[in-house]
Image: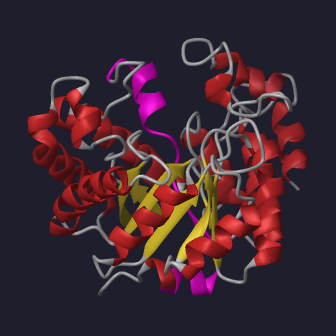
Amino acid sequence: MKKKGILERLKEGPVLGDGGYLLELEKRGWVRAGPFTPEVALMYPTALRELHVEFREAGAEVLQALTFYASRDKLATVGLEDRLEELNRSAVRVAREVAGDQCLVAGNLSLTWMYEPGSPSAADRVRKTFDEQLAVQVDEGVDFIIGETFSWLGEALIAVERAKQTGLPVMVTICFENTDQTAEGKSAADAAKALFDAGADIVGMNCLRPPQHILGPMEQMRKAVSGYLACQPVAYRTPKEKPDFTSLPEFPYALDPLQLTRKEMADYAAQARDMGINFIGACCGTVAMHIREMARVLNKIPEDSRIWKKGGEKPMSAYEYYDHDKLNVAGRK
């Protein structure tokens, strides 16, 4: 039986995305901090496969192929520009193997660091970059395309343009740095309108900011447009004056104490659902424990039903000894 596509699923209710890849794989020792390029898809595909499995088992309905920063210019920074096709192909294959009939697989485009406003030559270079990746990803059988982390609305619009050429559904998300506007000064509402007008099927915001600082602009988008919206915040706590986690001195080596709890990410999922966000996912810093709690609050997976025969007269774990079992059951209601 053919899997329902992303647009079919969105018609039925909110779709749960996956979490972050590059920063988590860096923590595990498979990606180098700095370039954050995804050569792990080539060099250690089993490590990437395991992370996909974790997100799938946590309840994610979409797995993104690890092709973020898998463009020729970015790969050149680590001497892998000649392995672009091989890397993109491997990343999609790993995601598809894990997804099976359970999850959809999204191809992925990202910011290029090459875009320049008002420069036709730079725009053409970005087009060529996107087309090169898309050709491989589509050939490997992705279900739809996600273009993400565009601080320039102009670059996001190019991503829509090129992704639409594939004939697949297209989701494109922008990001705000430390001010509530795109790099060229567009508001969240104006950006959403422009992306829909360009032909995107799903638009929204991702990365850089935690739920606390991304849901406000998302609400502006929701008031401005009626189409499908996507939200994928980071799971790091940031101050109001510096909401972009990459601008903090803790980035990238001291982020651990800033990571949000699983409950905070579950609360975000509930808020996003109630706001009318259709694709509810997450980005950097989000691991399986977050996605699992998000899945539970969105009724994607049941409470843990594995057998547990409690110890009778005496507790058999500190969880029982200190009445955490009673407290946590009460807290979930």
**At 75% from the left edge and 59% from the top edge, which residue is drawn?**
187
Report the front residue among 109 and 52: 109
**At 70% from the left edge and 58% from the top edge, which residue is drawn?**
186
Which image quadrant is residue 37 in?
A: top left
The stretch in magenta equals 8-30
Quadrant showing the N terminus: bottom left
Q: Is residue 304 magenta?
A: no
Residue 246: image x %, image y %?
61, 27
Against 43, is 180 above or below?
below
Left or right, residue 59 beside residue 277: left
Report the front residue among 93 and 125: 125
Which image quadrant is residue 281 in?
A: bottom right
Left or right, residue 151 beside residue 141: right
Residue 39: image x %, image y %?
24, 32
Q: Is residue 27 magenta?
A: yes
Residue 102 in view (yes/no): no
How many numbered callouts?
Answer: 0
**At 84% from the left edge and 31% from the top edge, which residue is drawn?**
324
Residue 45 in view (yes/no): yes
**At 41% from the left edge and 52% from the top edge, which residue is drawn?**
119
Quadrant showing the C terminus: bottom right
Left or right, residue 134 beside residue 322: left
